[in-house]
Image (cartoon, rainbow, N blue to C red):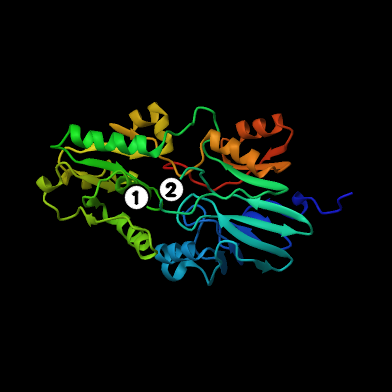
């Protein structure tokens, strides 16, 4: 008989986030704590002010880029697969395929193996290593797009739509809303893979992280600030901007832009229409329904905990297949532009 303590006895939800008692650390805490393990650099997972941070070197670099001296008291970089002991728990980080540096956290304690996925996707992304399924006793998974309606098309299909629009409207520019970390660089890399080698223009808020990706070895081709470029020079060009800037007066300098948004939520036509999106691009850095369910099968965990997103549908799917499944009441995660 297995005498290993059940995960709910040492891994629990607290007001600060998911807490591992034997390791005395929090995973992606919602507020500053003494010890934090950060799965990736998005602001709803990587917050400033923690006393000690463990993350991949790339996530550490992203946090320093975003927060400067406020990134954390001590920032410890651990490469994928590197074993780390934190008090009574053994840890390692493995690729999650979400953005550069993103990781799943593998925790081993007294014979029990737990994997906390963080955010992830399963499709190829030229800007980060692919997700690696990890066999485990408990799998803690996100559920941002955990409804059967969410089945993302191939990236190439959506990039081809963007390039077709550019050919169709040579007198206009293509203004694409992209999240600053991950989505921006993935769209750039996908454009290059499709053979588009012209400079891509961008809002200033995207430049810092894009240059960081390039310094970390991700080739994204020529990029240029859109600010200061003559209006006529931007006709027929592709311009990237944060989603919040699409309705900003900053866009007035652009030549009759075709407004596009790269997001998994563009599968929902009402969302695109409500935001005035002329060209919805269904490109997401999160797993869709098929990828989520495939991942549950791949890891083979008898127990599933489901965090932020459409928890109920994925819990029901797992329970139907004989898994012990429940939703976690974790708060503080933003899914708007993913």
Compared across the picture, whether 251 is left or right of 39 comes to left
User: Is 269 placed left or right of 40 in the picture?
Assistant: left
For marks 2 and 1, the one nearer the N-term is 2
Residue beneath disc 2 = 125
Q: Is residue 123 above or below residue 77?
A: above
The dot on residue 189 is 1
Residue 32 image position (x, y, % from top left): 56, 62
- What percent of the width, then of the height, locates residue 256? 16, 37
Q: Residue at x 49, y 31 (%)?
A: 150
Q: Residue at x 32, y 61 (%)?
A: 211
Camera sees residue 29: no
Packing grade of label 1 (10 A; few <14, some 14-19, many >=20) is: some
Q: Could you tell me which residue is drawn at 74 percent across and 66 percent down?
A: 88
Foreground of the two, 172 or 308: 172
How many numbered marks does the figure carry? 2
Mark 2 and mark 1 residues within 8 Å of each other at the beta carbon:
yes
Q: Residues within 10 Å of mark 2 (few under 14, many from 20)?
A: many
Q: Work out whether residue 46 or residue 141 is closer to the camera in this orientation and state it.
A: 141
Local secondary structure at mark 2 = loop
In terms of secondary structure, where does tag 1 sit? helix
> Quadrant of the image for the C terminus?
top left
Q: Nearer the viewer, residue 153 or 36?
A: 153
Q: CA distance from mark 2 to mark 1?
A: 8 Å
Q: Is residue 167 visible?
A: yes
| Image x and y of residue 133, in percent | 61, 48
> In screen coordinates, is 63 left or right of 171?
right
- Classify residue 223 as left or right of residue 309: left
> Is the residue 195 above or below the residue 59 in the image?
above
Residue 89, given in percent of the width and then of the height, sits at: 71, 63
Q: In the rendering, which numbered label is found on residue 253? A: none
């Amino acid at each position: 008989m297995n005498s290993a303590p059940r995960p709910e006895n040492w891994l629990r939800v607290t007001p600060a986030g998911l807490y591992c008692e034997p390791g005395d650390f929090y995973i992606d805490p919602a507020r500053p704590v003494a010890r934090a393990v950060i799965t990736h650099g998005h602001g709803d997972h990587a917050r400033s002010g923690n006393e000690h941070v463990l993350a991949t070197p790339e996530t550490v670099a992203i946090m320093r880029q975003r927060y400067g001296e406020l990134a954390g008291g001590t920032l410890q970089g651990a490469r994928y697969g590197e074993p780390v002991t934190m008090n009574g728990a053994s840890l390692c980080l493995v690729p999650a395929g979400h953005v550069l540096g993103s990781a799943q956290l593998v925790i081993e304690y007294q014979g029990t193996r737990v994997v906390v996925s963080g955010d992830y996707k399963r499709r190829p992304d030229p800007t980060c290593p692919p997700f690696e399924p990890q066999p485990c006793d408990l799998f803690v998974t996100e559920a941002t797009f955990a409804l059967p309606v969410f089945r993302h098309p191939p990236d190439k299909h959506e990039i081809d739509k963007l390039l077709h629009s550019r050919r169709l409207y040579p007198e206009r520019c293509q203004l694409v809303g992209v999240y600053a970390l991950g989505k921006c660089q993935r769209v750039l890399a996908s454009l290059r893979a499709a053979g588009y080698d012209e400079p891509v223009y961008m809002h200033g808020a995207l430049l810092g992280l894009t240059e960081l990706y390039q310094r970390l070895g991700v080739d994204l081709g020529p990029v240029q600030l859109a600010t200061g470029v003559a209006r006529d020079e931007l006709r027929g060009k592709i311009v990237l901007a944060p989603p919040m800037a699409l309705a900003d007066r900053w866009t007035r300098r652009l030549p009759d832009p075709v407004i596009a948004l790269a997001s998994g939520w563009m599968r929902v036509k009402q969302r695109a229409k409500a935001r005035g999106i002329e060209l919805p691009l269904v490109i997401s850095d999160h797993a869709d329904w098929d990828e989520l369910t495939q991942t549950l099968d791949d890891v083979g965990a008898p127990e599933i905990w489901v965090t932020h997103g459409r928890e109920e549908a994925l819990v029901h799917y797992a329970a139907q297949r004989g898994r012990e499944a429940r939703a976690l009441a974790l708060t503080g995660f933003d899914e708007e532009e993913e």
